[in-house]
């Protein structure tokens, strides 16, 4: 049968496609490929978001990169985006087979991310911006691609959290790790026949009556934050999460490996302390630890080398744990990543019109919020301080010269304090002495007009040679009936006035933060949170003050301290504080009166 080569073509081949250009699959794929990254670049790389360490605002990612690159403890964060990209690349074949089938549930995540974005922009802080990156990414994935994409990328999305330096966690994690690390090292030393004691974060050799050696004669170490495990903890947690994902299959095994990063980091630091003790006994303190030059501790090469023990012990423990959990399957587990799937259509779009609507929502909502940010008042209008100012010099806080049977004497800011504190910070300090011989130094520091211009005593005191044994928030009932929370720290410092004679100076230090409108709190990060919360939701930008009360105890020979001296000093200080605090802390009514006075005069 002959074929008709001149038959009429079908209607479908002659009629142009009636599908709108924007709903055609190839156009949609290109819009997704270029549109969403463009929004991310605008939000997080271009838009001036926060004042970091500079006068002008910078974007989230540029400010993050400069901040992290200057701090060795967090430089591992710079590697995380590269690792996330590699993790996504490993799943490229699987992602290519998944359809773009978004869900409107992604709008909730995107909306939450943009809410955090605006909060950080208004409060001038980066941590809400970090949350915004996470939620905006998950919102884009869910809204445009769908739940299957989110399941496939869930680990990479969670792993991205290691990009952000979680500095506020340092105190909450480092504080309990420091004394525990010292206690574990002391237990090991005693077990192997090296007498050692620990007090708080201090690890010292035990006294020996036969040889006439006192506490700390052989070795004396202070487990500061750099030796507590916190420096390496977050990096080791990142490594354990990545290793568990690559080498293990079962979620339970991955979770166990991730949780064990904490004890492994502490174990590594215990080994580090043992190496420092051994080096001190064999070659001396200067060789093992380094020299203390002024307020700076210069680490020796041996000290730096001992730091690698943290990673050595922790990594060895991680691989050993992996082998115990899924040793025979690890080789196959590694090979399963990046395995290509069967051929098929790449990123099919079963519902083009719905995908287009999701894409427009994903692009439109961030642009809308950027418009809101552009109209948001971000100027810094600092409120009146919450402490009284001196009548003769309104720049300085007020402290009375006499209080009950205590008589005070003024002391100006030292040259070191002027160099340490930010410009605009003002300080008032009186040293009080009672008829019974008790001496108390009271200091009120008024912050400058820049945010975060007050330093934590936990940072300043170790730089001055003090060891902080513990910190406890306590409640204080003031004489006028108000009740506040203050932080109480026990500190000590050893000195050797002459060879073979060691004396220890103990002291009690109370401090708390005083904001505007009668706000006060005992914790540093609580005052930071209140600063941002009130700036966003109450439109109050606090000018914070910090009150610090220092109560020294008489010097005593090391190992011969009288515990009753500390108990009596605490009671005397609490009684003194209950009288002193109302003299310089404004009530809410007094603050409102002072805040309204300039406006009325104007």
Image (cartoon, rainbow, N blue to C red):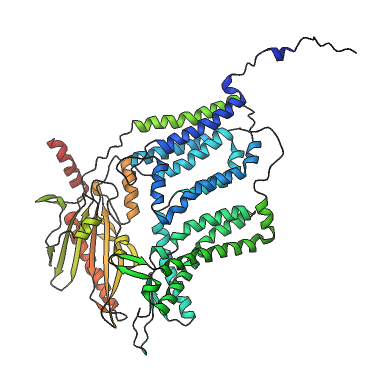
Quarter holding the C terminus is top left
Q: Nearer the viewer, residue 537 or 226?
A: 226
Q: Which residue: 62% across, 43% down?
A: 91
Give the vertical position of 247 relative to 539 (above or below): below
Q: In screen coordinates, is 112 left or right of 332? A: left
Image x and y of residue 426, in percent:
19, 53
Q: In screen coordinates, is 457 left or right of 392? A: right
Image x and y of residue 309, in percent:
49, 67
Quarter holding the N terminus is top right
Can you see residue 466? no
Residue 456 occupies which quadrant of the picture?
bottom left
Q: Which of 63 and 154 is in front in this view?
A: 63
Q: In screen coordinates, is 14 left or right of 466? A: right
Image x and y of residue 144, in percent:
56, 33
Q: Which residue lies furthest to the right in this view?
A: 1
Q: Nearer the viewer, residue 415 or 584?
A: 415
Give the vertical position of 397 relative to 348 (above or below): below
Residue 85 occupies which quadrant of the picture?
top right
Can you see residue 136? yes
Image x and y of residue 526, in percent:
34, 52
């Amino acid at each position: 049968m002959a074929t008709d080569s001149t038959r009429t073509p079908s209607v479908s081949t002659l009629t142009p496609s009636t599908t709108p250009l924007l709903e055609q699959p190839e156009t949609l794929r290109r819009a997704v490929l270029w549109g969403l990254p463009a929004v991310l670049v605008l939000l997080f790389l271009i838009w001036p978001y926060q004042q970091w360490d500079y006068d002008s605002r910078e974007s989230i990612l540029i400010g993050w990169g400069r901040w992290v690159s200057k701090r060795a403890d967090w430089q591992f964060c710079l590697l995380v985006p590269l690792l996330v990209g590699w993790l996504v690349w490993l799943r490229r074949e699987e992602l290519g087979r998944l359809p773009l089938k978004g869900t409107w549930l992604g709008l909730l995540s995107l909306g939450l991310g943009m809410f955090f974005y605006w909060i950080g922009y208004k409060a001038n802080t980066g941590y809400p911006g970090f949350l915004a990156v996470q939620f905006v990414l998950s919102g884009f994935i869910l809204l445009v691609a769908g739940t299957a994409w989110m399941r496939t990328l869930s680990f990479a999305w969670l792993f991205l959290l290691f990009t952000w330096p979680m500095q506020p966690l340092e105190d909450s994690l480092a504080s309990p790790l420091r004394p525990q690390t010292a206690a574990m090292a002391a237990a090991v030393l005693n077990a192997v026949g090296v007498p050692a004691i620990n007090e708080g974060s201090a690890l010292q050799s035990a006294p020996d009556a036969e040889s006439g050696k006192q506490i700390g004669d052989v070795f004396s170490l202070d487990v500061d934050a750099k030796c507590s495990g916190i420096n390496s903890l977050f990096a080791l947690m990142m490594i354990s999460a990545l290793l568990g994902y690559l080498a293990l299959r079962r979620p339970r095994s991955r979770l166990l490996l991730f949780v064990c990063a904490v004890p492994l980091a502490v174990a590594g630091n215990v080994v580090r302390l043992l190496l420092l003790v051994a080096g001190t006994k064999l070659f001396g303190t200067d060789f093992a630890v380094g020299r203390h030059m002024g307020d700076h501790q210069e680490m020796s090469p041996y000290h730096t080398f001992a730091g690698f023990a943290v990673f050595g012990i922790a990594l060895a423990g991680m691989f050993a744990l992996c082998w115990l959990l899924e040793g025979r399957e690890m080789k196959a587990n590694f090979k399963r990543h990046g395995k290509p799937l069967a051929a098929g259509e790449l990123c099919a779009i079963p519902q083009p019109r719905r995908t287009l609507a999701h894409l427009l929502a994903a692009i439109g909502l961030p642009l809308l919020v950027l418009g809101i940010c552009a109209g948001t008042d971000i100027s810094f209008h600092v409120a009146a301080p919450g402490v009284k100012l001196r009548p003769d010099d309104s720049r300085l806080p007020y402290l009375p010269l006499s209080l009950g049977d205590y008589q005070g004497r003024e002391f100006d800011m030292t040259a070191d304090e002027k160099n340490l504190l930010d410009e605009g910070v003002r300080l008032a300090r009186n040293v009080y002495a009672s008829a019974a011989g008790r001496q108390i130094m009271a200091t009120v520091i008024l912050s400058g007009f820049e945010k975060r211009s007050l330093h934590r005593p936990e940072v300043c005191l170790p730089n001055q040679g003090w060891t902080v044994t513990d910190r406890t928030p306590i409640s204080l009932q003031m004489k006028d009936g108000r009740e506040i929370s203050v932080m109480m720290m026990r500190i000590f410092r050893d000195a050797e006035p002459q060879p073979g004679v060691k004396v220890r100076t103990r002291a009690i230090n109370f401090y708390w933060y005083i904001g505007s409108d009668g706000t006060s709190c005992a914790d540093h990060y609580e005052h930071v949170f209140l600063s941002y919360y009130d700036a966003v939701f109450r439109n109050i930008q606090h000018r914070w003050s910090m009150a610090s009360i220092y109560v020294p105890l008489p010097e005593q020979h090391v190992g011969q301290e009288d515990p009753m001296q500390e108990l009596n000093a605490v009671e005397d200080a609490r009684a003194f504080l209950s009288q002193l605090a109302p003299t310089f802390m404004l009530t809410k009514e007094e603050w409102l009166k002072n805040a309204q006075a300039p406006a009325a005069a104007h």
